[in-house]
Image: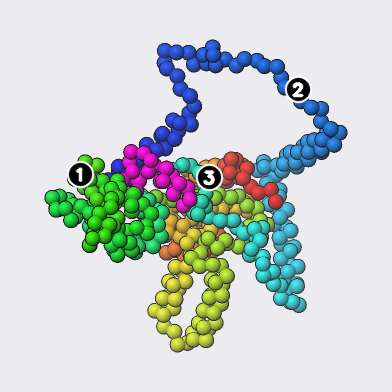
């Protein structure tokens, strides 16, 4: 059934490409339009002469556009130019650090309270995702939820309405318990018919029934699933009163169809989203300024997290003597569960920084692969050092959460340890196509 669901999405993507390919024609006919379709030239429509004010405004707009293009050209993305900028920034950074150290002796330097809310200080604006099942777009999670919902409801009009309704139940509702209760109830309705195909009472569902009202009707896709299973809404007498019922029609759906649908309901899953790496290349000054993380990185809001961390730190400080190792480990695990994503930065020997976004459940080897696919010399072994320590190869299958590389981490790239080779790094480390992404700050 999982293969059937996958084939369903592949078919829909193929159909979308076919529709967007444009008008077709038969193999035995010319691709040129028929005579009746040939464009007949018409007398051009005479345009009114623009006013003097319009001419001045147009000239000003062209001047601004040209100035913008010239400004863009000034930013040289050649490796030599980037290296020069890095050296200059490092020198400025060193001087700025010395000045801050002097100021720190006389007064405490505090960040503005609203600084975290300023996008200029955010390392990334948000977390973005891909959904290969549907399209190659890169969107936020909320944007994907809307797009997936629209996509699935559009497919209800097609042949696979039953399978689509299963996917709607799993993807367009919230609350695992509510979804599971709905699925179990729907399974019970169908299995009663499969086990007792000649018993009339199992072929009817009273829509005023409490279980139906609480567990089935409120969830998106549930009613569509029953209709795809052959149920039709009818008015029937119940205790001398006319009420709404869903009645199964054997001609609309066979027992084999019901067996397939109940299996689809059990095996359908949430359409997976893949975290987009949101690759960025930063200079040292940019990396130092852009340190804040958006709230989407956490399971609670950033403000709540900071407040709770402060209270917890104060409580631990007061009770440090009385706390056991097990208690401290339990607190640490609780703290780690607050993180959903992590920002990984890799600093190269030329001080250029490669940045990517990862799920905390991604394995460390995915970070290694991310670095490798952006290198000029991808075949040469390299090391990623954490505070001067190498992460061992047997840790590559551990998650970033297990390695505590959260919510942000800086790794140092090195070719050290490669024996018998003199490496030419005059062209840098990252591919030219990647270096072009360096921010023009």
Q: Residues within 10 Å of mark 2 (few under 14, many from 20)?
A: few
Q: Residue at x 18, y 56 (%)?
A: 201
Where is residue 143 drawn, in percent x and y? 51, 51
Q: Which residues are magenta?
A: 144-165
Residue under pointer 3:
374
Where is residue 433 drawn, in percent x and y? 58, 40
For numbered disc 3, what is the local secondary structure? loop
Q: Earlier in the sequence, mark 2 or mark 3?
A: 2
Q: Is residue 254 above or below residue 235?
A: above
- Colour basis: rainbow
Real-space CA distance between mark 1 and mark 2, rounded to the nearest whole angstrom: 68 Å
Q: Earlier in the sequence, mark 1 or mark 3?
A: 1
Which quarter of the figure is the N terminus placed in?
A: top left
Residue under pointer 2:
46
Q: Residues within 10 Å of mark 3 (few under 14, many from 20)?
A: some
Horizontal side of residue 172 vs 410, given as left or right: left
Disc 1 or disc 2, which is closer to the eye? 1
Q: Is residue 70 above or below residue 186?
A: above
């Amino acid at each position: 059934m999982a293969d059937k669901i996958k084939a369903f999405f592949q078919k829909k993507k193929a159909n979308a490409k076919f529709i967007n390919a444009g008008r077709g024609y038969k193999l035995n006919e010319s691709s040129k339009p028929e005579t009746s379709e040939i464009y007949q030239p018409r007398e051009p429509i005479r345009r009114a002469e623009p006013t003097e004010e319009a001419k001045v405004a147009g000239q000003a707009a062209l001047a601004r556009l040209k100035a913008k293009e010239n400004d863009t050209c000034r930013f040289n993305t050649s490796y030599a130019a980037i290296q020069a900028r890095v050296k200059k920034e490092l020198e400025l950074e060193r001087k700025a650090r010395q000045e801050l150290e002097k100021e720190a002796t006389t007064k405490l330097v505090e960040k503005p309270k609203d600084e975290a809310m300023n996008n200029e200080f955010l390392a990334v604006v948000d977390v973005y995702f891909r959904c290969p099942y549907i399209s190659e777009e890169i969107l936020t999670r909320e944007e994907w939820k809307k797009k997936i919902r629209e996509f699935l409801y559009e497919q209800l009009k097609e042949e696979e309405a039953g399978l689509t309704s299963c996917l709607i139940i799993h993807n367009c509702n919230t609350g695992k318990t509510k979804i599971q209760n709905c699925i179990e109830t729907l399974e019970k309705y169908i299995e009663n018919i499969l086990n007792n195909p000649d018993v009339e009472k199992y072929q009817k569902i009273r829509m005023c029934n409490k279980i139906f009202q609480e567990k089935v009707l409120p969830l998106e896709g549930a009613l569509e699933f029953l209709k795809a299973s052959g149920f039709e809404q009818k008015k029937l007498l119940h205790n001398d009163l006319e009420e709404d019922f869903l009645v199964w029609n054997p001609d609309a759906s066979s027992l084999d169809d019901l067996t397939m649908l109940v299996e689809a309901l059990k095996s359908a899953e949430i359409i997976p989203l893949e975290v987009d790496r949101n690759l960025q290349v930063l200079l040292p000054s940019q990396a130092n300024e852009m340190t804040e993380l958006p709230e989407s990185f956490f399971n609670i809001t950033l403000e709540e997290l900071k407040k709770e961390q402060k209270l917890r730190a104060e409580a631990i400080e007061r009770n440090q003597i009385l706390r056991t190792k097990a208690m401290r480990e339990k607190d640490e695990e609780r703290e780690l569960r607050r993180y959903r994503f992590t920002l990984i930065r890799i600093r190269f020997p030329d001080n250029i920084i490669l940045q990517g976004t990862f799920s905390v459940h991604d394995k460390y080897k995915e970070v290694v692969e991310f670095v490798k696919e952006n290198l000029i010399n991808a075949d040469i072994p390299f090391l990623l050092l954490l505070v001067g320590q190498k992460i061992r190869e047997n840790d590559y299958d551990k998650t970033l959460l297990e390695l505590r590389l959260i919510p942000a981490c800086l790794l140092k790239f090195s070719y050290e340890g490669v024996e018998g080779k003199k490496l030419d790094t005059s062209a840098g480390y990252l591919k030219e196509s990647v270096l072009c992404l360096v921010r023009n700050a």
